[in-house]
Amino acid sequence: MPGAGRNGIRWERCLFFCAVAAACLFLWTLARPLRTGRIPVVMDLGYFHLPLRTWYADCLARGCGFDWMPEMYNGLFLSGEGEHGPYHPFHLIGYRFLPLDRAFALEAFLLFPLMLLGMFLFLRRHIGDAAAMLGGLLYTFSANNFCHGFHVNYLGILAHVPWLLWLIDGATSAATPTRRRLSLVGIALLTGSQLLLGQPQALSYSLLTEIVYCCFLLEPLRRPLRLGLPLLSAKLLGVLIGAVQLLATWEFLGHSTRTSMNPYLGALPFALLVQLLSPALMRLPLEGWFYEAFYLGMVPIILALCWPLSAVRCPLSANDKSRQRLAWFAVVLGILAVWLALGRRGGLYSLQTMLPMVKHFRAPGRYINLLGLAAAVLSAVMFQRLVERVRNGQPLAWRRLALPWLGVAGTLAAALAFHYAYPEIQQRNLSSSFYAGTLMALGAATALTVAARGRAIGLFALLLLAVVDLDYFCLRGPNVGEPLWRYTPTLAEWDARAPRPPACSSGRILSINVPALCLLRQGERLVNGYWGGLEPRKNLDYLRLLPLRLSGAAWYSVYDRRLLAHSPEFAPADESWHAVPAPLPRLRLLARTRVSDNPAADLERIDIETTALVTHPIDVEDGEAAIAYLLHEEPGELRIRADAPGSRLLVIADSYDRAWRVEVDGEPRSVERVDGDFLGCVLERGAHEVRFTFRPASIYYGRRLSLFGLALAVLIAVVPTLFRLAATRRGARSPRSPSGRG
């Protein structure tokens, strides 16, 4: 037989080591920023995550709070926005003790080896080493994961998914109660870790994957409760561990613009599914579509097409039922992923819009990432089937190879159709050619045929084609993976690129140009922030002059001057920057108030320099203006010195939030909402020291719940083992019973 004996073992080991070598080469390439002392800055990494983590690392170094960030949106409950996962242990430790550039590059890189190792360990429970490593390669280095390489929190949660599936396997098949208990504790810890990363949309993908997988594990178990109750308890313990971030996000969500956003925005256009057959279609941006590169590679497509016919009436071993369940799990998960990604067109996504919190997610097309996971699992199962056929000398019948070759014909038909439909795409290289997919499919189908007929060389050819496909179209794709590891300046070089105002000013900046967010690293303060996360809901329109003056903005920069056509008072300083006339100071003491339930309209009817809009009648004494001084400031705390000639309203041009607390000379007072969006409090005649502190209840209770959940998880993992060891020692020390005498 062709693969029998030691020769079979040797080529299988060689196949595995070739896959490991390919994975190491990919990781070595991705680690370029980490190796060269540079930072990845593509899109959100440089314009959003790096400024946030700069500020976060500075807060950790100074030992001050990091829940409130005064530098964005005139002040923002940043822990509730959650894009940087401030309470995750990796972030707390890494950004406290590592240099910023090392911590940032490590965070962006570490997701890929963790995902690869998790996929390998999960698949290895059911299939051989070589097939498991191939599955790990196909998912970890897929186009969709590279496409989200700049969404580090999003991709970080997805990197937990293979590990959770591996632990679910361990919890249901462990040989001892100790291993089962430790697996359940591991599930709780990883669930808490996901929640602490602060990206609930990606968490919903993880939950869907886990639920589908558990459904396929229920079949071999006689008592479903044996699986369901322990797993549910572990997940609930994980929710307890992640409570600090979950409660903060829940609190912030109710005051954000996400509640009014169209949940179907970014649904997958059905016609774009042809991208699976052609990598050139990854370069076709469509209006209203959040770009998602979900080209899976031709090797997974060809292997998946071979599975249905090869699995009919031909089990290879007694353990093949486990692999069949794994394959069917992948098929069902893939169908659900595409169905949900279609949004309103599919209908199933409408059910999600009825759930709390989850209903506010957008971009259902991102469910397509689970299709990549499903394709990798199904490909690994089919590859293992081919390995066993080559090893046992059992060639696959020719008729069972019909679907893969029909897939080749499909890629050719798609190439011809899109070649004439999109003639504007220049075919200067392979990545922009509609026929690249056909060439890869032809090679994969040929290699599959050779392997199916019992030749090990076909398996090596499949692995090589998969690696070349991933390398050329994903890792080195100009609009997918390459920017992640190639466009990597140093911190100093990146700071030099930040657009700066023409003159220095102590006022805030309105910048709708995304690159200007880099100014946060220079200590500048923004009226707005990144338009893409959870944005706080505002009552005022900051593209108008009066709200900008109230916020203390000195400069603004927009990509389209027409956005400010209704405010001709702005004076252009150069092509990019415009000066805001007469910005108001951050601290003011006002003697006039007016009740308003529509501050955006009523601002035009008052003198904003002397009068404030409030939500209820406030008694102040008419008279001369007064001055207040800022004594001390750190994130979430302001200490102010004010000398009021009479009863006055102290106004601070920082964002109002219900979590603000104020003390005047040590006595608590009520915080007022002023001019729709700002802070204030009433002061009596005389000199006062005023202290504002930001104390959200979600953080107060969330920290305690998270610490309690973490302590409970440690106790569950450690205490039973300690009791058993103590009992063993007592048994060893106790003397044997003396034998009686007659």
Image (cartoon, rainbow, N blue to C red):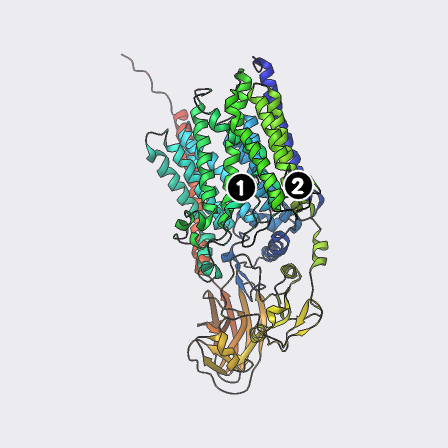
676 is higher (above) or lower (below) than 366: below
Q: Is residue 57 left or right of residue 394?
A: right
Residue 361, x across and y down, in percent = 47, 53
In the rendered image, residue 677, in percent from the top left (x then y), is placed at 50, 70
Report the Cα–Cα distance between label 2 and label 1: 27 Å
User: In the image shown, does 152 or 394 lie closer to the viewer?
Assistant: 394
Residue at horizontal 65%, vertical 59%? 515
Quadrant in the rendering for residue 629: bottom right
Residue at the disc numbered 2: 431
Count the marks.
Answer: 2
Residue 19 in sight here? no
Q: Is residue 199 above or below residue 471?
A: below
Most foreground residue, 428 or 184 = 428
Of labels 2 and 1, earlier in sequence is: 1
Q: In which quarter of the image is the C terminus?
A: top left
Q: Which amino acid does label 1 sit on?
A: Ala
Q: Name the residue under label 1.
A: 159
